[in-house]
Image (cartoon, helix red, strand yellow):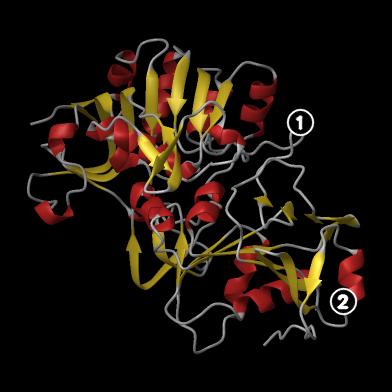
């Protein structure tokens, strides 16, 4: 049995400077209530690993506006002018990573692999400073794994054991990030009894999930 | 017919029945409007759906179902929702038959630059680097010049998206195929002469025999 905790309680577990893996693609599939609780608490200095920084007023954009992010490892910041302004002002250190490489680096971190070999980024600024490895005559970039102190996950259903399923394009990085952090916090749309998610439909086994966000605040 | 419609119609003719196709945001997304009736394909949105459908009716949007530009979409019968690791696994793994992307510059080697303008626009590469490195066929669709300046150059001056040669460049003026011997002019746009194309292209163009006018239906 997991216990469902209030957003404020969970936000208080996240210390200053933590590395946060946050699910979502332009705020679709981002745990908004958990983000709101972090903004309300106001402790920051976070390194955020995510697909993008969304838009001002949505998802990770709220953490940007609140000044809680000091480093962002993301594939895209194009829809958030605040991130770009803070990057230029030196307030946020932005590392841009190709989307497929980013998700695979997180996966590597979650499944115990020492890195990823990918052709993506060869001959581009992404390759700067990275080893090139030849395998069977083909060149690949060596990309290192990424892990987080916390993964903040948005899911469709969670059952009382913490088993999760996801909705449509709100999967995105969530199931991968759920494997790659020391503490995994899931924000479900609905919490359902054990058995309501059939075993075949479970995408994230409950053994990976540490805390569920309660439905009420 | 405006330039974008010419380009979208011409690219649509290269889409074959049964393909999995990824269309970029903006101009490339228009290709879906001009597919022949007898061509049945799945469109992939890299944020996590195979079988992207049209925009839903007003008020019927599902906040968990968007395309890679964050716009609300539907899923067609037979669609599948997938996470980002699966989505980019399909892209890098050679399971994506065709990707259509926009371009800032393409050069004589067939290398594309489309993700940043240093000092001006740094949105991030998103999925573009993985798409160009991994898709079986890479089609660049773009207007031929930018404010009168050629975009097809001897060598890109902007940071590259990949050092893999793209398959085809389609503009309102020309269809150009990068080959081992450089850029080959395959077709000219409606009412456009070979000399017009040469004048608007900074890279050398090779002509093999008669260059036909592009078909649009």
At mark 1, the secondary structure is loop
Q: Position of residue B139 (x, y in %)?
A: 61, 65
Please give the chain letter of the residue carrying mark 1: B
The answer to whether residue B214 is above or below residue B104 is below
Disc sitting over residue B64 in the figure: none
Nearer to me, B42 or B132? B132
Subunit that carries the residue with mark 2: B
Position of residue A148 measured from the top left corner of the image (x, y, whole percent):
34, 24
Residue ID for mark 1: B119
Mark 1, residues whose alpha carbon is within 10 Å: few (<14), some, or many (≥20)?
Answer: few
Is residue A56 at least partly visible in the picture? no
Q: Is residue B89 visible?
A: yes
Q: Residue at x 50, y 49 (%)?
A: B130
Question: Which residue is labeled 2 in the image?
Answer: B194
Please tell me whether mark 1 or mark 2 is closer to you in this view: 2
Q: Is residue A16 above or below residue B123?
A: above
The number of discs equals: 2
Task: Check chain identity for marks 1 and 2: say if they share one.
Answer: yes
Is B191 situated left or right of B216 in this image? right
Mark 1 or mark 2, which has the lower sequence index?
1
Q: Is residue B109 left or right of residue B150?
A: left
A195 relative position to B171: left or right: left
Residue at 81%, 63% in the rendered image: B144
Q: Going 10% across and 44% down the picture, which residue do you hit?
A: A193
Q: Quadrant of the C terminus of chain B?
A: bottom right
- State if disc 2 and disc 1 touch (CB < 8 Å): no
What residue is shown at x 25% (from left), y 28% (from top)? A184
| Residue A81 image point, x, y percent | 66, 33
The spot of residue A34 in percent (x, y) is: 36, 28
Query: Mark 1 to mark 2: distance in Å?
Result: 35 Å
């Amino acid at each position: 049995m997991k216990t469902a905790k209030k957003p404020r309680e969970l936000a208080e577990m996240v210390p200053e400077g933590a590395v946060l893996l946050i699910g979502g693609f332009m705020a679709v599939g981002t745990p908004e209530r958990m983000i709101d609780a972090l903004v309300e608490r106001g402790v920051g200095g976070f390194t955020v690993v995510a697909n993008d920084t969304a838009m001002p007023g949505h998802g990770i954009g709220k953490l940007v506006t609140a000044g809680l992010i000091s480093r962002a490892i993301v594939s895209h910041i194009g829809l958030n002018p605040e991130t770009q302004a803070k990057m230029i002002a030196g307030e946020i250190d932005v590392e841009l990573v190709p989307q497929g490489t980013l998700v695979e680096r997180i996966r590597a971190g979650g499944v115990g692999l020492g890195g990823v070999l990918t052709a993506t980024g060869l001959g581009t600024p992404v390759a700067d400073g990275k080893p090139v490895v030849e395998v069977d005559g083909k060149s690949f970039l060596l990309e290192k794994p990424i892990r987080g102190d916390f993964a903040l996950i948005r899911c469709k259903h969670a059952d009382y054991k913490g088993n999760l399923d996801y909705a449509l394009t709100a999967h995105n990085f969530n199931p991968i990030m759920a494997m790659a952090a020391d503490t995994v916090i899931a924000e479900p749309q609905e919490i359902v009894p054990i058995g309501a998610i059939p075993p075949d439909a479970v995408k994230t086994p409950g053994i990976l999930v540490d805390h569920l966000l309660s439905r009420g605040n | 017919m405006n330039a974008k419609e010419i380009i979208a119609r011409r690219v649509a003719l290269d889409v074959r029945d049964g393909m999995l196709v990824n269309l970029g945001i903006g101009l490339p997304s228009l290709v879906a409007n001009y597919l022949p009736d007898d061509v049945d394909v799945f469109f992939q949105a890299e944020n996590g759906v195979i079988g992207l459908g049209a925009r839903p009716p007003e008020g019927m949007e599902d906040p968990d179902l968007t395309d890679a530009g964050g716009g609300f979409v539907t899923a067609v019968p037979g669609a599948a929702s997938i996470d980002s690791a699966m989505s980019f696994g399909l892209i890098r793994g050679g399971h994506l038959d065709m990707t259509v992307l926009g371009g800032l510059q393409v050069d004589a080697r067939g290398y594309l630059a489309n993700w940043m303008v240093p000092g001006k626009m740094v949105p991030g590469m998103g999925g573009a680097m993985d798409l160009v490195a991994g898709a079986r066929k890479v089609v660049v669709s773009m207007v031929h010049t930018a404010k009168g300046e050629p975009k097809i150059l001897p060598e890109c001056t902007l940071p590259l998206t990949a050092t893999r040669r793209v398959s085809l460049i389609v503009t309102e003026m020309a269809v150009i195929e990068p080959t081992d011997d450089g850029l080959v002019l395959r077709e000219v746009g409606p009412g456009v002469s070979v000399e017009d194309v040469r004048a608007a292209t900074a890279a050398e163009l090779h002509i093999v025999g008669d260059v036909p006018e592009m078909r649009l239906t």
